[in-house]
């Protein structure tokens, strides 16, 4: 088992520098944590955990414990050095008070507290404090136990206080998210569990545990060869073309570690991390890796005589089919640059050249030493190139037919197109069943809304070869209605619609159809999800008519109905429960589910690549028990609790 050895270093009161104060966080929390929905709520956990991981990166921590308490607060404990407890000279306050209550105060801005770090520009702890109704810290350091307490958004409740002696070191943080800030303060065990697992995979030898005192669930994560295990997680049940390839190197104080593998699958999955922070929007390290990969593979193919003069070079799209890769870089604070406040994209220019150079040099050697596997990669890339060319020709044929007004009706299924020509304003409704499809056609705004009814269950894209997928009439109709291609040939700008809205019954069958459609889009039109063009419509469950009244209104959930009945115990009402969309007439469907002014939509997005991969494999795979367990933990198909791994809630229509 890989070991993390604790070092000695001058991490003291003098390491802490102050830049500015705290109040702006509560006024504009989205600037610091991205949002105040469930994603923003969990971002609080990541900030505190990342501080503990920074201690591990520096070599002083080998265990982190995270607890979801019964009161839905979070406790994070590590066995690092412990926060410095002396007086901070510049402010005259205790150093913990400075660290946890003053924005831009920390050991990451100067001195030698940390060489590399992953916290949010060093402001993570104070931001969490600012957005919490209670924030308590316990510090084990220099043989003593100290505590300090904050409340009501970062206000000091108890000064730093010595409470005893100890032989251990470390920091314990407990916080309660402020209900005035967050729309939902319920933490998800599975969301936190997957993120902690990811952190353990990225840090070989580091032990991370999660305990949920609400349900008594508990998991421990520790990996000897983390990135290789990570690749296996991403690979799932896909057959290998190559075993994991490990690439390591250091240049200009930037440490690079890359693990990649090829599978027989068709999708690409590349994850990037800088100082342990996931760069979900990519960056210079990913660009450098791809450039190095393309260079090495072309050089090898030419030396082997596979690519002749008449052949084009293999490009990035040829080589990404079935590619799984994790690119991690450790960059000194003096060089690290991000684009955006929440660090979604790495901007350090040196990382591009260094990742390209190390990838190319190490991969050149691997390709020569593993020639049979290398030839398999080249063969797969050549097949991908040919398939791409065939798909391009087929796509062009469809365009030509459209231009001549001879579009194949079978390809478009029962599509009722929108009349408007503005693609970004146009909406495509994928509707469950012919009956609901008929109501939707009658009730729609034909200027910008198109309707495509779907018959029966959609084919499972997770378990179907692409050749068989393309033979399916429903899938073909979706592909050709959207008009932007498929897989590697998908071009977002060619999409005929700015919004694609899944409209199914509010029952288990409807939920299953949603998941099947999301699986297809995730595997073959992922850019639609990445660019937030996929939505789920939320039809109401109930129509309520007070006795003796001609007026009526709608309720969307069982909870809304229960709340209404409790609030109006003496009112007699007629309740109509909609079992399906087909029970609504055209006017009802328009005003409840299709009218942009009144409808409720869930915007689908990808928040975590590993979580999304695991969720789709679990939901659409063969292991029924695992699928049932995941659904019970994560999914309630209502407005309040949407699909945890991909959904971003919207009340009313969210444009743009």
Image (cartoon, helix red, strand yellow):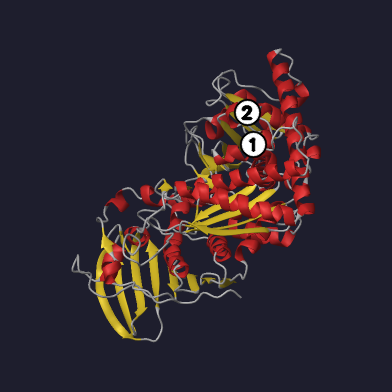
The reply to whether the C-beta atoms of the residues labelled 1 and 2 are less than 8 Å apart is yes
Question: Badge 2 is on which residue?
Answer: 440
Q: Residue beneath label 1, please?
A: 581
The kind of secondary structure element at disc 2 is: helix
Give the secondary structure at mark 1: helix
Res 321 visible:
no
| Vertical position of residue 381 compared to residue 417: above or below | below
The answer to which of marks 1 and 2 sits earlier in the sequence is 2
**With 608 as the anchor, is 241 left or right in this view?**
right
Image coordinates for residue 137, horizontal then vertical, percent: 35, 72
State which quarter of the image contains the N terminus.
bottom right
x, y (%) of residue 183?
42, 52
Place of residue 101 in the rendered image (x, y in percent of width and height, measured from the top left): 28, 62
The quadrant in which residue 427 appears is top right
For the residues labelled 1 and 2, the Cα–Cα distance comes to 9 Å
In the image shown, does 9 or 393 lie closer to the viewer? 9
Task: Describe residue 245's horizontal placement relative to residue 655 as left or right.
Answer: right
Crowdedness near tag 2: few (<14), some (14–19) or many (≥20) residues, C-alpha within 10 Å? many
- Picture quadrant where residue 90 is located: bottom left
Residue at 56 percent across and 59 percent down: it is 249
Q: Is residue 8 visible?
A: yes
Task: Tell how many labels.
Answer: 2
> Seen in the image, is 37 located left or right of residue 608?
left
């Amino acid at each position: 088992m890989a070991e993390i050895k604790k070092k000695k270093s001058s991490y003291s009161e003098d390491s802490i520098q102050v830049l500015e104060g705290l109040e702006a966080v509560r006024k504009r929390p989205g600037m610091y944590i991205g949002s105040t929905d469930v994603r923003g709520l969990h971002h609080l956990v990541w900030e505190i955990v990342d501080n503990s991981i920074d201690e591990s990166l520096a070599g002083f921590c080998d265990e982190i414990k995270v607890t979801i308490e019964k009161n839905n607060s979070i406790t994070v404990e590590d066995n690092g050095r412990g926060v410095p407890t002396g007086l901070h000279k510049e402010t005259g306050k205790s150093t913990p008070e400075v660290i946890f209550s003053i924005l831009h105060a920390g050991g990451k801005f100067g001195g030698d507290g940390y060489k590399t770090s992953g916290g949010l520009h060093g402001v993570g702890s104070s931001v969490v404090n600012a957005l919490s109704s209670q924030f308590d810290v316990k510090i084990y350091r220099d043989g003593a136990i100290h505590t300090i307490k904050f409340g009501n958004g970062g206000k000091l409740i108890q000064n730093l206080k010595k409470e005893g002696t100890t032989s251990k070191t470390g920091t314990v943080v407990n916080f309660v998210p402020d209900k005035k800030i967050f729309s939902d303060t319920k933490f998800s065990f599975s969301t936190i569990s997957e993120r902690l697992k990811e952190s353990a995979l990225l840090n070989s030898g580091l032990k991370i545990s999660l305990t949920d005192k609400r349900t008594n669930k508990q998991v421990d994560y520790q990996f000897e060869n983390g990135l290789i295990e990570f690749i296996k997680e991403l690979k799932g049940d896909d057959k290998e073309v190559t075993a994991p390839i490990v690439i390591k190197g250091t240049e200009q104080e930037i440490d690079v570690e890359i693990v990649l593998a090829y599978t027989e699958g068709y999708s690409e999955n590349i994850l990037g991390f800088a100082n342990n922070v996931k760069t979900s929007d990519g960056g210079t390290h990913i660009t450098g890796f791809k450039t190095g990969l393309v260079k090495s593979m072309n050089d090898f193919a030419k030396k082997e005589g596979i690519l002749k003069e008449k052949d084009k070079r293999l490009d990035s799209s040829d080589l990404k089919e079935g590619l799984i890769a994790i690119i991690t870089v450790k960059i000194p604070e003096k060089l690290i640059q991000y684009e955006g406040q929440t660090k979604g994209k790495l901007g350090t220019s040196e990382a591009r050249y260094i990742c390209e150079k190390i990838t190319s040099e190490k991969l050149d050697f691997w390709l020569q030493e593993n020639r049979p596997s290398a030839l398999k990669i080249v063969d797969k890339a050549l097949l991908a190139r040919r398939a791409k060319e065939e798909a391009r020709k087929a796509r062009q044929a469809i365009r030509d037919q459209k231009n001549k007004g001879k579009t194949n009706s079978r390809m478009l299924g029962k599509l009722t197109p929108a009349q408007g020509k503005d693609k970004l304003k146009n909406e495509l409704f994928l509707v469950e069943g012919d009956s609901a499809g008929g109501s939707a056609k009658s009730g729609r705004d034909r200027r910008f809304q198109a309707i495509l009814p779907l018959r029966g269950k959609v084919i499972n894209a997770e378990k179907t070869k692409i050749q068989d997928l393309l033979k399916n009439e429903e899938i073909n109709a979706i592909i050709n209605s959207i008009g932007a291609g498929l897989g590697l040939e998908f071009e977002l700008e060619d999409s005929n619609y700015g919004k694609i809205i899944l409209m199914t019954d509010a029952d288990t069958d409807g939920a299953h159809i949603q998941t099947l459609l999301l699986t297809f889009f995730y595997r073959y039109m992922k850019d639609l999800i990445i660019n937030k063009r996929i939505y789920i419509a939320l039809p109401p469950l109930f129509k309520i008519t007070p006795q003796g009244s001609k007026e009526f209104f709608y309720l969307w959930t069982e909870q809304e109905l229960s709340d209404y009945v409790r609030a109006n115990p003496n009112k007699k009402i007629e309740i109509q429960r909609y079992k399906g969309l087909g029970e609504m007439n055209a006017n009802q469907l328009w005003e409840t589910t299709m009218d942009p002014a009144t409808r409720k939509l869930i915007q689908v997005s990808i928040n975590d690549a590993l979580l999304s991969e695991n969720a789709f494999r679990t939901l659409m795979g063969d292991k029924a028990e695992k699928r049932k367990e995941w659904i019970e933990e994560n999914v309630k198909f209502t407005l309040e609790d949407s699909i945890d791994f991909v959904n971003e809630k919207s009340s009313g229509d969210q444009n743009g």
